[in-house]
Amino acid sequence: MSDAAELVARLRERGRTVACAESLTGGLLSATIVDVPGASEVLLGGVVAYATELKRALVGVDERLLAERGPVDPEVAEQLAERIRALCAVAGRAADLGLATTGVAGPDPQGGFPPGRVHLGIASPRGVRSVELDLPGDRAAVRRGSVDRALAEALVELDALDAASVG
């Protein structure tokens, strides 16, 4: 079973939801989840905020943070993940998981960062964290690798949520 299929199955089993804020993946993360039958029960929505200004305007990333550090930053990824959870609330309930991708797909460096530098944001009721990646390959490989790791990190977060609810 693919990580996307496992994520959808586990979210459905537990009545949980996910929302995505994407930059370098340009909607590929959401599309990968949507490819799985039953995704409509768990994916609340998402935003592709490719332009830096839209990370602020649409998702609410701190303007000063973006001005000082730029979009390729772990805290930006965390804010994207945290805020997309709230933005995609249904009936007053935030998404259980917020996933975010930001970074440099290539082929050229951006803001002093090499192609393949990626920050993932993962937010849940437990809190928010980021994961930094340095992925090899061309644009397609970096984007695909980002999606694969974001899905894997979502499963890790679900494990932690399950452990917290049992303990």
Image (cartoon, helix red, strand yellow):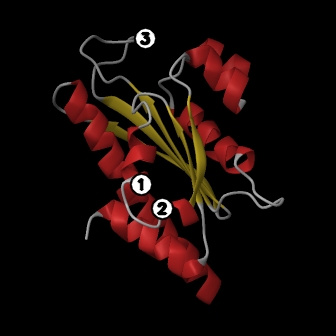
Ranked by sequence position, the earlier of labels 1 and 2 is 1
Q: How far apart are marks 3 and 2 (CA)?
A: 35 Å
Q: Which residue is labeled 2 in the image?
A: 39
Label 3 sits on a secondary structure element that is loop
Q: Residue 39, relative to residue 111: is it above or below?
A: below
Amino acid at dot 1: Ile
Amino acid at dot 3: Gly
Q: Which residue is labeled 3 in the image?
A: 111
Q: Where is residue 23 in the image (x, y as percent from the top left)?
A: 48, 29
Q: In which quarter of the image is the N terminus?
A: bottom left
Q: Distance between the residues labelled 1 and 2?
A: 6 Å
Label 2 sits on a secondary structure element that is helix
Q: In which quarter of the image is residue 33?
A: bottom left
Q: Residue at x 40, y 50 (%)?
A: 150
Q: Which residue is labeled 1 in the image?
A: 33
Amino acid at dot 2: Ala
Dot 2: within a 10 Å radius of its alpha carbon, few (fewer than 14), some, or many (20 or more) residues? many
Dot 1: within a 10 Å radius of its alpha carbon, few (fewer than 14), some, or many (20 or more) residues? many
Label 1 sits on a secondary structure element that is helix
Instruction: Return the residue found at the far right.
Output: 92
